[in-house]
Amino acid sequence: MSTASKILKLPFLRLNRAKAAEFARLQALNTATANTILALPHDVRRTLTSKSFVHVEIGSAWINQTIRNTNARTKVRQFRGLPLETNNQNWTLHKVGATYSVSFGVRRGIKKRLPLAVHQAAHQPWLEAILAGRASPGSIKLWCSRKGLWYACLSVSMEVPDAEPTGKWLGIDRGHTIPLAAATPQGPVMFWKAKRLRHIRRVYAKRRQRLQAAGKQRAVTKLERHEGRIITHINHCLSKEVVGLAQRCGAGLRLEDLSGIRSRSRQRQTTKTDAGQNRDYWPFYQLEQFITYKAQLARVAVEKVPAAYTSKSCHRCGALGTRKHHAFDCPRCHYHAHADANAAQNIRDWQGLCCPLVLEAPADGAHDLPLHMVRKTAGS
């Protein structure tokens, strides 16, 4: 059994203006408390408890979590906004009919129950597991979006069965121009193109350049967040499709280990100046994290293999070939294929090397002389 964790972002159902204004007021008070803590010396911060803020109307459990969050942010000078957060001992989940609600007390001595809007397909199994005792609730955070919508972010952990080995693997090759190439156990290779990713990177890079030249740093930060949300959504969609493909094929997922790829790979200056081609913008680790946790929930095995020579070795004979852009040619067996498809097949069939190695002796024996052969002289 392995433990899977997830944060459920649930909007409050029909939250009226009075409650929304009260949440906003308490969050502003919580932010002011955190900034007061930041103004104190480090040795004084570590001795603070909820007794130090008895005059604040926020509950002691929420204040203690604020103190912990503030002390953990060692590089922050001032908070613009710090959401209210507390541990699992100070909130409870309820269900009345088909409506879920969560009860908590932000103000001292006052505890109220608020209904939640639930996405039936994504969140209902987790909430039912909490009510049945199969899942462990974590912290709760009250978060307000930029549109003014209030959410309850619930942290949940649940034990899921380990993936059963099937003996079949889906080889996944990740790249910059082609984000994913998947070699199925049956043989066909599927591609996910990165045309939209490159277009988004280039468009937003030009917008940032114009805003930076105008000195609008706040607009640049807002634009970067928007771009990051789009890329994250694309990675979520890619990982969901790959895990679904592995489930349909009844196979596990094999990924190449790309640790330290940015420090090992070199780029030309012309490539780095192009936002659509720069590998520093390549979100491969985020995609790997999404694939891993989605596969864990779907009971799909995940294995990482070394990435060395997966793109340069021939899938059929194992010889080192030549790669030019997306074309791969083998000089031994004259195998010609897409380079990413060849790499995905090598990852799928990985057996301790980039591909199986078979040594065969010639039918008529070896003809070369053995190494370090001793020749007899006439006098010996």
Image (cartoon, rainbow, N blue to C red):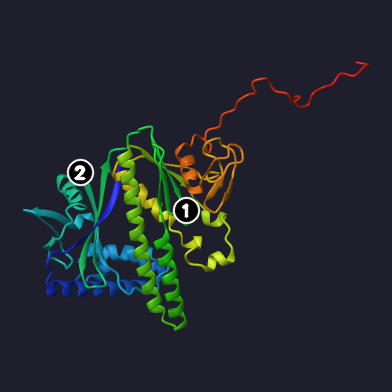
Give the residue furthest to the right. Answer: 379
Residue at disc 1, secondary structure: loop
In the displayed structure, does residue 341 sit left or right of residue 227? right
Percent position (x, y) of residue 185?
Answer: 39, 37
Identify the amino acid type marked 1: Gly
Q: Nearer the viewer, mark 1 or mark 2?
A: 1
In the displayed structure, does residue 171 sit left or right of residue 263? left
Residue 175: mark: 1
Q: Which residue is depicted at the point 32% across and 62% down?
A: 68
What residue sits right under mark 2 in the picture? Answer: 134
Q: Are marks 1 and 2 in contact (CB under 8 Å)?
A: no
**Image quadrant in which you'd find residue 153:** bottom left
In the displayed structure, does residue 29 sit left or right of residue 319? left
Identify the amino acid type marked 2: Arg
Nearer the observer, 144 or 315: 315
Q: Earlier in the sequence, mark 1 or mark 2?
A: 2
Is residue 329 placed above or below 108 in the rendered structure?
above
Percent position (x, y) of residue 84?
Answer: 25, 66
Please rate how many residues cluster around mark 2, counting C-alpha atoms within 10 Å: few if below 14, some from 14 to 19, many from 20.
Answer: some
Percent position (x, y) of residue 101?
Answer: 12, 58
Is residue 87 placed above or below 136 in the rendered structure?
below
**Image quadrant in which you'd find residue 2:** top left
Is residue 204 placed above or below 241 in the rendered structure?
below
Please rate how many residues cluster around mark 1, counting C-alpha atoms within 10 Å: few if below 14, some from 14 to 19, many from 20.
Answer: some
